[in-house]
Amino acid sequence: MKKEKAFKLYGIFGHPLSHTLSPAMHEAAFRTLEIDANYIVLELAPTAFKKLMSQASKLSLSGFNVTVPYKEIVMGYLDSVRPEARAIGAVNTVFKQGNHWVGTNTDMEGFLMALMKDGGFRPSGKKAVILGAGGAARAVVYGLSREGVREILIADCFPQKARKITNDMGKLFKRVDYQAALAGTPEVKEALQKADVIINATPIGLKSQDPRVIPEEWIPRSHAKKVFFMDLIYNPSMTPFLMDAKKKGHKTLNGLGMLLYQGARALEHWTGRKAPVAVMRQALLQALKGQGA
Ligand code: NAP
């Protein structure tokens, strides 16, 4: 295997960042690929982040990730942004092309790889319900639309946020039938009965005291048809949303695969090498265990 000589530094910007699993995943990959590199946590307050980014050309990094709350504002500091990241409205991975910083969105690719590869679900022609209309939901909606989903209903406590996504995506994907709804309404209950895939893109379920993101009785019985339930949350590995669905006999998948594959794609952008996915998955599981998951 080719050993790379020059030391390289990668990292993740966000605020807060105390529980990030990205260093464990990327450093395991660097060791396997024999790349002399470190991946550091760069927890910066907004003023410090903006100051640093205003001099992005001087950054001594070879590439970096960006997470909440900087996925949108980072776009203003880059030399270019890939069209799909621009359409999603968020950049989570930045890599170098010559002296230029290029932003892309590997959350969308990570989501699709988890859903299709790990979950074995094919979105083409299917009906989807997305719970939540934040940044992650935008990546999910873009990915499903790109793969030819037929209908998407997005439900959020602020339906105007859902409507913004349906309006933006409607301009790009003319064949998809988009609907926006207020969370908890009969419209959402009805869409859940007809859906082939239901995705939790809210943070509801992260904390043990969280309420249910949808009432258990709104989950259809699986004897009519098996539905695919995905939660973008990976810690805990089984949220009440997934537990309710599993109890009723449906297929379930948590967000670990999305985290893994977005990281794998980021690494490939940075290094031009094929990501050692199995090693990265193992490192993630190990790091989660270390956090008591
Ligand atoms: P976000 O920007 O906070 O968006 C979440 C959205 O859900 C907000 O609009 C929120 O409304 C809405 N919401 C809250 N409760 C709801 C309910 N009961 N029904 C419908 N909508 C509701 O968060 P995000 O960045 O999109 O992330 C969402 C989740 O995905 C988080 O748990 C995050 O950890 C996870 N995620 C996972 C990965 C991965 O790799 N697996 C990647 C990205 C994100 P309010 O604004 O009113 O709260």
Image: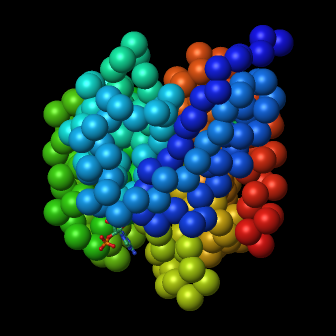
| Figure check: 56 above or below 250 | above
In this rendered view, identify the residue nearer to me: 253 or 215: 253
**Is 184 placed left or right of 293 in the picture?**
left
Quadrant, the C terminus: bottom right
Q: Position of residue 141 (x, y in %)?
A: 37, 44
| Residue positioned 44% across, 27% down in the render | 95
Q: Position of residue 112 (x, y in %)?
A: 53, 36
Q: Position of residue 34 (x, y in %)?
A: 78, 24
| Residue positioned 44% across, 50% down in the render | 13
**Is 203 placed left or right of 100 in the picture?**
right
Can residue 198 be seen in this snapshot?
no
**Is 220 placed left or right of 58 in the picture?**
right
- Quarter of image, ligand 1: bottom left
Quarter residue 286 falls in: bottom right
Q: Position of residue 87 (x, y in %)?
A: 26, 35
| Residue positioned 36% across, 17% down in the render | 99
Quadrant, the N terminus: top right
In this rendered view, identify the residue nearer to me: 249 or 233: 233
| Figure check: 24 above or below 4 | below
Quarter residue 151 falls in: top left
Total number of numbered discs in the rendering: 0
Can residue 280 be seen in this snapshot?
yes
In this rendered view, identify the residue nearer to me: 285 or 124: 285
